Amino acid sequence: MRILFVCRMLPHSLARDSGRLDTYHYITALSQEHELTLVAFVPPEDEVGLEGMQQLCQKVVGIAYQPHALVPRLRRAWHRFWQPKVYGRNHSRQYVLALKKLVAAGSFDVAVVDGMMAEYGRYLNPIPAVLDEVDIFSTVAHQYFRDESRWLPKMWNGFDWLRTTVRETTHLQQFAGIFVRSAKDEQLIREFAPQQKIAILPPWFEGLAELTAIPINRSETPRLLFVGAMNIPANITAVTFFVEKVFPLITSQRPDVQFDIVGSRPTAAVQALGKLPNVQVTGDVPSLTPYYAKADMVVVPLFTGGGIIVKTLNGLASGRPVMTTIIGNSGTGARDGRDLRIVSAQPEGMATAILEVLADDGEWLRLAENGRKFIQTHYDWSQTTANMVQFLQSVSQQRT
């Protein structure tokens, strides 16, 4: 097949967010038997990934993206005002022109469109296109509305939630097919578009390779671990809540417990957390494996999120007990009490649950082994890519 990938930011092997790594590994698998073309925004820090993607794809079209330049930022702010935030921030005349040129010059069997780039689907006709809906954006927008306490931002978030729902519903009906990451998201989309052609496409994550090889054993010093890009608001809220509200309750009972916050681009507020006792903020690291290996437990205290939470999957794969909120277990399919523990969103309940598992070697080992077994049983990469190809072929046959 000749497949066109319409991405937001350039996927490549060194990308630090799970969505782009997802796409990179899909492209890597498909490139062995199919002709791929990729179009994406390329900020300066991602130019290092261009050469590698050019080796995988027949053609790569990179659109310069200036995250800090004043005029581009003003343009994006203007479009975010008039359009739902998730779509408005990606408006680009250059991208539109490049995409039109590709469609006119190429002969593609099918296109795969990043969910955030759904607005660009209108320029793909007559190519049958699949929307890769990594998140259900209206759900995430509702979480921001729900969690905002200030009345003016709450009103704006409510408005953005409503218009995101309207626009997303339209997109879900316009594409020839939809990829989702979990059965939960498939069920949600069925409510918006009951007749739509949908396939579940589980994500790639580090745990599929490196993390499942980590020996299942306890560390000498009890260490809790949170992993995630530390410039993302949901992650910042999670670690701030944990350090300020939960961790003091844990260290009051177990002064030896350490907490590692591992992830790229920590904000000044996150870096400040690293100055507190027993808390370490690493910033970007070349490999996550050593941090999982020395961890005693993975915590995922998220209150906002959509799609499937990859940090939870990685924790399960690493053979470490995972303690998470309901949101942190979103879409994974892991069962509370068997594969992981879903803990209270209240500080006292969360701290108590973590202390219980830290103190119980038998429960620690049971959760560690069950979590890894769950990943090995339910996330098989070769089967995932085979299903992806089959779905794309069925969509490509819809060309009129």
Image (spheres, grey):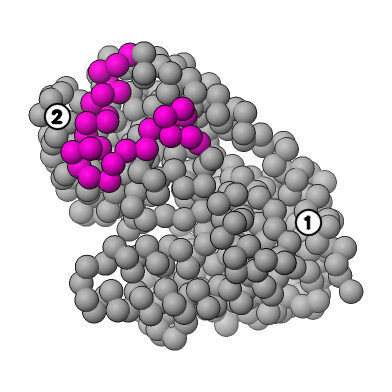
Q: Which mark is residue 251?
A: 2
Determine contact: label 2, label 1, CB under 8 Å: no
Return the disc, 2 or 1, that comes first in the chain's sequence. Answer: 2
Q: Of all residues shown, which one is farthest toward the left?
A: 252
Please state the horizontal and vertical placement of residue 123, each as a whole percent of the image: 70, 79
Residue type pointed to by label 2:
Thr
SS at badge 2? helix
> In the image, what residue occupies the spot 27% across and 29% down?
354
Is 189 displayed left or right of 84 in the figure?
Answer: right
Q: CA distance from mark 2 to mark 1?
A: 51 Å
Residue 354 part of the magenta-drawn span: yes
The structure residue drawn at horizontal position 42% and vertical position 73%, both measured from the top left corner, is 161
Residue 108 placement, left or right of 249? right
The quadrant of the rendering that contains the C terminus is bottom right
Count of numbered tags: 2
Pointer 1 residue = 392
Q: Residue at x 52, y 47 (%)?
A: 331
Write down the quadrant of residue 74 in the picture.
Answer: bottom left
